[in-house]
Amino acid sequence: MYLTQGLHRAAQQTPDAVMTICGDRTRTFREVLDRVSRLAGALRALGVGDGDRVAMLGLNSDRYHEYLLAVPWANAVLNPVNIRWSPAEIAYSLVDSGTEVLLVDDAFAPMLPALREQHPGLTTVIHCGDGPTPAGALGYEELIAGAEPIADARRGGADLAGVFYTGGTTGFPKGVMLSHANLTASALGGVASGYLFSPGVRFLHAAPMFHLADLAGWYATVMLGGTHVMIPAFDPVATLHAIERHGVTASLLVPVMIQLLVDHPATAEHDLTSVRHVMYGASPISAAVLERAMKAFSTAGFVQAYGMTELSPIATLLSPQDHLDGRLRSAGRAMPHSEVRILDADGVEVPRGTVGEIVVGGGHVMLGYWNRPEDTAAAIRDGWMHTGDGGYMDEDGYVYVVDRLKDMIVTGGENVYSAEVENALAAHPAVAACAVIGVPDQEWGERVHAVIVCQPGQRVTAEQIREHAKTLIAGYKAPRTIEVVDALPVSGAGKILKRELRKRYWDVDGRQVN
């Protein structure tokens, strides 16, 4: 299968049904197919060749949706950019992937000078906003209007669909290569589970569309011929309004979004009974928030998904019934397309209830990391993706995540690798040594916490450290809390003992994660 297949089928069967709703713009399957074929034609006319990477830096919109379809239609490869990254991080990903064509909207057009300076190879910029087209950029609507439609390349199967950048354990982002078959396996698993999507779905894009979790919902909705409702970014009132106005049936939200929604005073004023499926991930949801959410979304089933970008992205699901049966600490059971095992350090499966590394197999396991064969070989062994998460499986096949073998923090639904933050902090002249850990946080699940040793005679405030970090890394990666100590605990080999730093923060059933 291929990403554009659902568009072809829906345009054949229900051409005048609505495919996208974005603000005051509503477009049918027939209209979207024509626009996508023309945008693909424009990309080819601009010199985009087979397998070339085309990036998008923008908020959620119907144009983002068209980009996701037009790039494979043109036989090229998607590169959705993390909108929360700093210009330096974005430029790194564009340079690393060899991306020469970038679509950018009004919100991020001011970044263009910095991106061009740091990536001279950025030859073509397409402005897909509603404001004035920046100097040196091409207008999106003008391109579509003036382009000839081309036939769909039907890029699919094992062909590379996209390069999706995630944080790196070495401090540099890594490009995860996912094929059409990878993404299809995950989307089909979600549909087959019966808990996430169904024909007639009206999916709300409130989470960012660059993120694999939302993209999984996007693809399943395309596959089923459903309707996409877009708001630029999550906002409680805008989300409530979109659900009521457009009869939204499903959405992907992270726990902090759910909490902000159910605690907002406007929630009681909106009709939310159209919602049937709420999927969330990145961290468990508290029983108190879930109880309030189930009252607010009284017709919806709540589903927790566990996975990672490298798994396209879903591996396990915790069903609506599981939520009611007291299994909130579990990450659920393997989805129809997925197989999960718990292995020891020698690669041997451990008995049920024993902690080991969670490994995942199936057609959704990534092709590998872009230009990183050694990292790929370390992550994928005998076809199994080694997640870097420590956990155990009970007798009924439910997986429980208890620790991260990789030095990663999940905060508000975003992955942060400690090495990225430590590299940024170490560049401050007052910092002699530092360690970054995740600590529990009621609102964000986990928060980034830094422990710092200052240079002799030097002093630095938490705000100075945060502002310094944000010049090098995305704001959400900067430490929310900072502790200054005289020395860090180290092993005999000189390795910082982060578990010792975590001890006074974590004491929840032996778990070191939220």
Image (cartoon, grey):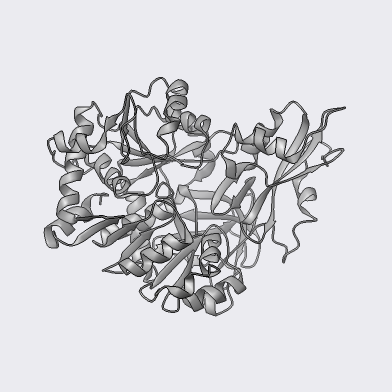
Name the residue rendered at 55%, 75% in the picture. 292
Count of numbered marks = 0
The image position of residue 363, as x and y in percent, is 38, 53
Q: Where does the image place residue 70, in percent across and percent down from the top left?
A: 24, 42
- Which one is in front, 379 or 59? 59
**Toward the viewer: 392 or 234?**
234
Q: Does 74 sit left or right of 79 as displayed?
A: left
* 498 displayed left or right of 458: left
Residue at the location (62% across, 46% down)?
Answer: 406
Can residue 252 be seen here? The reply is: no
Against 410, residue 263 (above or below) is below
Task: Tell me what residue is drawn at x 26 percent, y 58 percent.
Answer: 223
Determine which quarter of the picture holds residue 192.
bottom left
Up/down of 323 relative to 495, above or below: below
The quadrant in which residue 357 appears is bottom right
Residue situated in front as seen by the camera: 274 or 48: 274
The quadrant of the rendering that contains the C terminus is bottom right
458 and 129: which is toward the camera: 129
Eyeballing the image, is 200 above or below 486?
A: below
Residue 399 in the image: above or below residue 119? below
| Rendered location of residue 20, percent (x, y) | 26, 56
Say whether residue 512 is visible: yes
Image coords of residue 171 (percent x, y): 60, 34
